[in-house]
Image (spheres, rainbow, N blue to C red):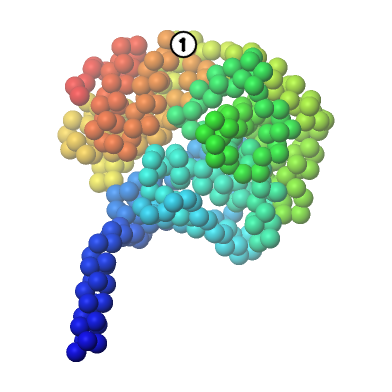
Amino acid sequence: MKKLLLATLIAACCAASASAAPAEKKIVRVVSAHKYFTVYGPTHQDANWIASQSEDFRARLLDALGWPEPGKETMEIILSPSAKKTKRTYEIDGAAVKSVVTVPAKGDLFWDNVAPEIIRHQALCCSGVRDAGAIRRYADHIPAWLTAGVACYVDPRTAPGYANSVRSDVLSGRFLPVGELFAVRERLRASGLGAAFANESAALVAYLLRLERGKERFGAYVSLLNGDEGWKCVFEDMYYDVFKTDDELDAQLRSSLRNPRRISLNAPRMGMSESVTLLNDAFETAVVSQAGVRAAGPYIEDFAAFKQCCKEEIARRKLMAAYPVLIKLKFEGSEMTQGVVEKYLQAYIMNRDRKKFWKAFVDAENARRKIAPDAGTAIAN
């Protein structure tokens, strides 16, 4: 009898403990039509959104940096509500690379957690690092400043704001010497140091891209990274004709940062007319909504027959297609167009929240109509 009572008590305690445990959100598999990315997430909406963002981001990344188109590559992204930190594994089959990454499903999910992993994955795919031992020593063959700098350089939340921060550090004497920048082997966790490292790394990436044949040379550098040599040897060989020591590179980088006009792009500003024409042309891109509806024109009036959800999706895709032009106008466009460009970039940042995105996008469209006479009439929110 005592044994029966004891067994009953233990069973009751176990049941109570099980009912008190928090329920883990289910990770669902999304079989998407995307070429390079498969995403698993707590909801199909989250997974599809991340997969779409990832495809767009990958294309822009390779174009902006001059990185070569890799061979066979795939990436699986697992959005985990319970993950405390990012976990990653790599599968190598000859020249083919497959990355499997688990990221915490929190914060600004794409830019904080997913985009840095795509950059890390693309750097590996574009390089010649294929040996499993070399991949385990990732930082020896693909530098931390490269992945952190590219992440900051292409992030619309920090570009081109990082430039002002770095220039301030140079003028105040707080700038981290290039030799110390190169010595960092992994992402810095301390918020202050991490931000400074990312900002200065982004400034170095921007400087390398501004050199003569900058994109071509930067792309060649990444493609020549390999599992036999350290990244520093390849770097010195690639840029030996420009600077022969870390101190010489440090001096040239500091000199460029002291000139505000050269911090983002060493090029003159466009005129107002040219800037507006480029902005209008960017939104002429024809897109197809997820519902299969085609919109050929650039203006919201052309979308009058569509449902609101289709309007939002078409507008989002137009904005994604126009993003490279917006960044170019941010750096090179007429100062009179900067306010409009900022509004579009703000909408880009908010594109996951439909209501906030739509409001920001309409505000940007109306602002464009005020400076572009041929852009149609203002629209209601």
Task: Name the residue at 56% across, 50% down.
Answer: 121
Question: Compared with residue 346, is residue 133 higher up or lower down, i.e. above or below?
Answer: below
Q: Which of 129 and 253 is in front in this view?
A: 253
User: Which quarter of the rendering shows the N terminus?
Assistant: bottom left
Task: Name the residue at 67% across, 18% down.
Answer: 173
Total number of numbered labels?
1
Left or right: residue 310 compared with residue 33 = left
Residue 91 visible here? yes
Secondary structure of residue under mark 1:
helix
Name the amino acid, label 1: Glu
Whole-percent x and y of residue 373?
32, 12
Question: Compared with residue 156, is residue 275 higher up or lower down, i.e. above or below?
Answer: above
Whole-percent x and y of residue 78?
42, 55
Whole-percent x and y of residue 356?
27, 30
Question: Compared with residue 106, is residue 178 higher up or lower down, i.e. above or below?
Answer: above
Residue 32 visible here? no
Q: Looking at this view, name the residue that lies furthest to the front.
A: 2
Task: Name the residue at 54% across, 59% down.
Answer: 89
- Residue 80, quarter of the rendered image: bottom left
Q: Name the residue under label 1.
A: 335
User: Which quarter of the rendering shows the C terminus?
Assistant: top left
Q: Which of 218 and 279 is in front in this view?
A: 218
Circle 1 Cα neighbour tier, 10 Å, few/some/many (<14 / 14–19 / ≥20): some
Whole-percent x and y of residue 161?
50, 22
- Residue 314, quarter of the rendered image: top left
Left or right: residue 37 compared with residue 370 = right
Task: Name the residue at 63% across, 15% down.
Answer: 172
